Image: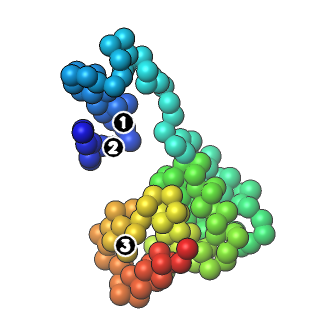
Amino acid sequence: MLSVAGGKWTTFRHIGRTVMRKLQALPGHPLGDDFEPVAALPKKLPLPGVANPRAVAHRLLVDGPAPGPRMAADTARHLATHYGSLAFDIARLANEDPELARRVHPDAPEIRAQIVWARDHEWAETPDDVLRRRTTLTIRGLATDEVRADVRELLDKK
């Protein structure tokens, strides 16, 4: 068994090729002697959500999915720079449920739809998963008890 931990999106191809080479070097490896790990992994594969953040923010502000209130400019920029084109999926969540369009904290651009996205698509299970690892709310001193309770409540809903 070979475990990989701590990789980043920007190095996933290198890590994948390294793991495949390690597996191929094991006696009785299941990949076959003629398996070439470098050839088996795509050389170019865009990261999820790759898009121009300015274009995404512009579309969120101008085309914003209807119905619903227009998104605040700082929230649009935040979603665009952190999620790329996946920001449209988060905006859709906020449009479908206006409660998810509310800010997590009044002094921050993050919206509650990001909590649901983190739960449903990024395996977030605890308030710290959201507040410390998927946002910078804790670092900015905005992870109040009230915010933590709100995050916990959204994480518990399925």
Q: Residue at x 67, y 63 (%)?
A: 92
Front-lying residue, 40 or 52: 40
Q: Residue at x 74, y 56 (%)?
A: 63
The image's colour scheme reads rainbow
Marks 1,2: beta carbons within 8 A: yes
Three-letter code for the amino acid on which mark 2 is drawn: Lys
Lower position in the chain sequence, tag 3 or tag 1: 1
Three-letter code for the amino acid on which mark 1 is drawn: Phe
Disc number for residue 121: none
Disc number for residue 8: 2
Q: Position of residue 8 (x, y in %)?
A: 33, 43
Q: Residue at x 48, y 82 (%)?
A: 153
Q: Position of residue 131 (x, y in %)?
A: 37, 70
User: Mark 1 — residue?
Assistant: 12
Q: Is residue 35 above or below residue 51?
A: above
Three-letter code for the amino acid on which mark 3 is drawn: Thr
Please state which of the two labelled residues, at mark 2 or mark 3, is closer to the viewer: 3
Classify residue 93 as left or right of residue 17: right
Quadrant of the image containing the N terminus: top left
Disc number for residue 126: 3
Task: State whether residue 67 appears in this view.
Answer: yes
Identify the element where label 1 is drawn.
helix
Residue placed furthest toward the bottom: 146
Q: Residue at x 47, y 75 (%)?
A: 155
Q: Is residue 101 above or below residue 45?
A: below
Kindly report the distance in space between the C-alpha atoms of the residues bearing marks 3 and 1: 25 Å
Q: Position of residue 99 (x, y in %)?
A: 62, 80
